[in-house]
Amino acid sequence: MSDAVPVSTPEFDPRRIRRLRRYTWWSIVPMQPFYVMAPLFLVVVGASQGHYSTVEVLLLAVVAVASAIDGTWVARSLMQGLGHGKQRPVVHAAVFAAALGAMAYTMHKDGTGALWSMVVSGLAGVHVSAAPYRWRWPLAIGTALAVAVIGTFASSPDNPLLGLVPGLFTAALVSMVMSLVLAAVWFWDIVLELDRARTVSAELAVANERLRFAADLHDIQGHHLQVIALKGELTERLIGVDDATARASAAEIAEIARTALKDTRDVVHGYRHTKLTSELENAREILEAAGVRTTVDGDATLVPPPLQPLFGALVREGTTNVLRHSRAENCELRIVTDGPRTSIVLRNDRVKPPNGAAGSGIEGLRQRFSAMGGHVEGRLVDDWFELSGAAELGRTS
């Protein structure tokens, strides 16, 4: 008989997404200007050696600058994911054709076109990644074939067989860079989808909690209102026929209404079937689903049972505030029990707004804690928001 090995679930860390975003940005956005530097340098060197005229240098420089601007513009929009790039088909086609022409001209002129193929490959990578799915593969394959044909005939127009090797080399280089850019954007697109799914999961967790509350409220109100309606009809029929029974029925209606009111208040204030331990589990699940790393210090089972609903309400209100009024990455909850006295501190970072006034939820908590001889306080401490509450068993105001 083998012991089961517990599987630990990795905690979600939103900083990983930010780091990956920075890595993806630096891998894609600044690359097109980087690809342009070497060809421009060789053009300047070639001009100093008499290989290029001033007009040729200016034209090639214009193509290089246009390629850098167009490629960077498209690459920045790719941070939204695959196929989300902003499309300017005429401008993109003109710049890409100019880059292909520069590659072919320099390959024919002095054999430096292999470096210009990097300019072409950078443009091809971002354009293919920004294209809709149905156009992605045709564009990639068409670009590779076009580069192979142009490179072959530009290298050796009189004998294409001699130009086949440089043509295939340039096509392979362009294909490789295209694949790397496409893979990087594809991976980032998957991360964005998972992040959106995580956000939806957090919203569903909150919605499920609201549905649970609505179901409890419906169960109470539906049952009591149905009985009140039936008793009211019976009382109406008995008036003038059996007044004593009618009065007794009316008294029952009043008692049922008082019971319904008490049960409703119990549900609203979290007294009905609510424990601090269950609220902690719900809070951890909801916060971690929203990407907030949550740590709990202390044992909730040591909190006296009469105080469990009170502190459960504090944890529930604090969790709601974290989700609504912050962009929190970390949340810490500390439980301290000292004999009959219990205190709980829930704190989170990245508060928004930093100096907002206390809402009706915290004000309601203050009233409830005050009725138990305790107190609630919400304050900013070193850019962290702290919601703390303390109460003592057997003490009332």
Image (tube, rainbow, N blue to C red):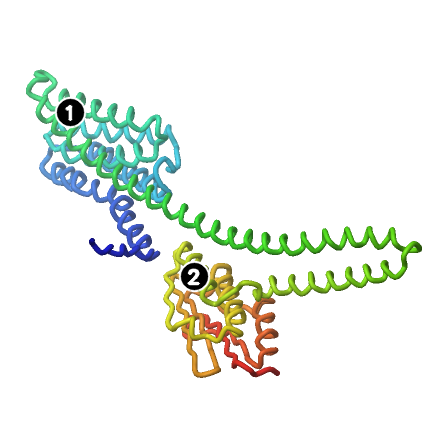
Q: In this image, 30 relative to 357: left or right? A: left
Q: Secondary structure at mark 2?
A: helix
Query: Which callout, 1 or 2, points at the residue further toward the start of the chain?
Result: 1
Quadrant position of residue 43: top left
Quarter occupied by residue 47: top left
Q: Which image quadrant: the C terminus?
A: bottom right
306 relative position to 250: left or right: left
Q: Which mark lies nearer to you, 1 or 2?
A: 2
Q: Residue at x 90, y 55 (%)?
A: 239
Give the residue pinned by disc 1: 151
Using the image, determine if residue 202 lies above or below residue 127.
below
Q: Amino acid at mark 2?
A: Glu
Q: Nearer the viewer, residue 325 or 76?
A: 325
Identify which residue is drawn at 26% across, 32% down: 124
> Percent x, y for residue 281?
43, 61
Q: Could you tell me the amino acid type at mark 1?
A: Gly
Q: Between residue 362 and residue 28, name the one nearer to us.
A: 362
Image location of residue 147, percent across then percent down = 19, 25
Q: Residue furthest right?
A: 240
Real-space Cα distance between discs 1 and 2? 64 Å
**Which residue is rendered at x = 48% and y = 82% of the image?**
340
Establish if 163 lies above or below 248: above
Count of numbered marks = 2
Q: Which residue corresponds to mark 2?
A: 281
Left/right placement of residue 22 relative to residue 299 reads left
Question: Above or below — where is 205 with respect to 81?
Answer: below
Residue 66 occupies which quadrant of the picture? top left
Q: Residue furthest left?
A: 162
* Relative horizontal placement of residue 208, taking residue 246 as reference (left or right): left
Identify the disc placed on residue 21. none
Q: Residue at x 46, y 63 (%)?
A: 278
